[in-house]
Image (tube, helix red, strand yellow):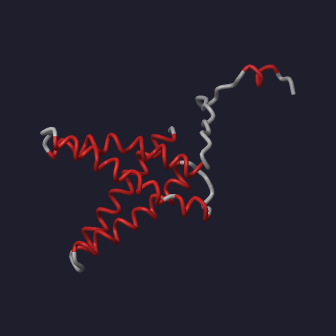
Amino acid sequence: MSRFGRFVVGGTVNTAACHGLFLVLSWSVPVAVAYSIAYFTGIALAYLINTTFVFRTRVTLASAVRFPGVYLVAYPVGLVVLTLLTGAGVPKWLAMPVVIAVNVPVTFALTRWVMTGGARHREPASRPEGAVGAYERSGIR
């Protein structure tokens, strides 16, 4: 699975977990408190998912400090898109999926930059199980 695919899967898991946390907390604390706890838990969980599963990098203090900045950029991007769409008459229920569609690649690019230190590392192409290249077949060592 590509990094972007892992990013989508990880984001889906994170969103579901944080939504569940919000629902459980909202039964016993004010919704603003539940939302805040779930939101900040989501940032921490997203950091762990992105380091260990998506980009497979080490957890470092530098990337942990930079990571919340991804959300400081993604939030206004989403807000501008949402404002433009709803201002143009697009229904709110339809505008939000567009905001998500815009923000996923923005968030992916920013997260990749944070996790890789700005370098655009390409993943090695994977071969099908049992595939052998010409070098390996030649027997030359």
Residue at image location 43% in from the left, 51% down from the top: 10
In the depicted view, which residue is nearer to us: 123 or 78?
A: 78
Looking at the image, the residue that sits furthest to the right is 141
Q: Is residue 114 left or right of residue 42?
A: right
Residue at image location 77% in from the left, 25% down from the top: 136
Q: Position of residue 19 (x, y in %)?
A: 29, 62
Q: Is residue 132 left or right of residue 51?
A: right
Q: Position of residue 96 (x, y in %)?
A: 23, 46
Quarter of the image for residue 72 reads bottom left
What is the quadrant of the C terminus in the image? top right
Q: Is residue 56 left or right of residue 39?
A: right
Q: Is residue 59 above or below residue 79?
A: below
Quarter of the image for residue 14 reads bottom left
In the depicted view, which residue is nearer to us: 79 or 40?
A: 79
Q: Is residue 42 above or below residue 139?
A: below
Q: Position of residue 140 (x, y in %)?
A: 86, 23
Q: Is residue 94 above or below residue 48?
A: above
Residue at image location 46% in from the left, 64% down from the top: 44
Q: How many marks?
A: 0
Q: Position of residue 47 (x, y in %)?
A: 49, 59
Residue at image location 34% in from the left, 56% down from the top: 15
Q: Is residue 23 left or right of residue 48?
A: left
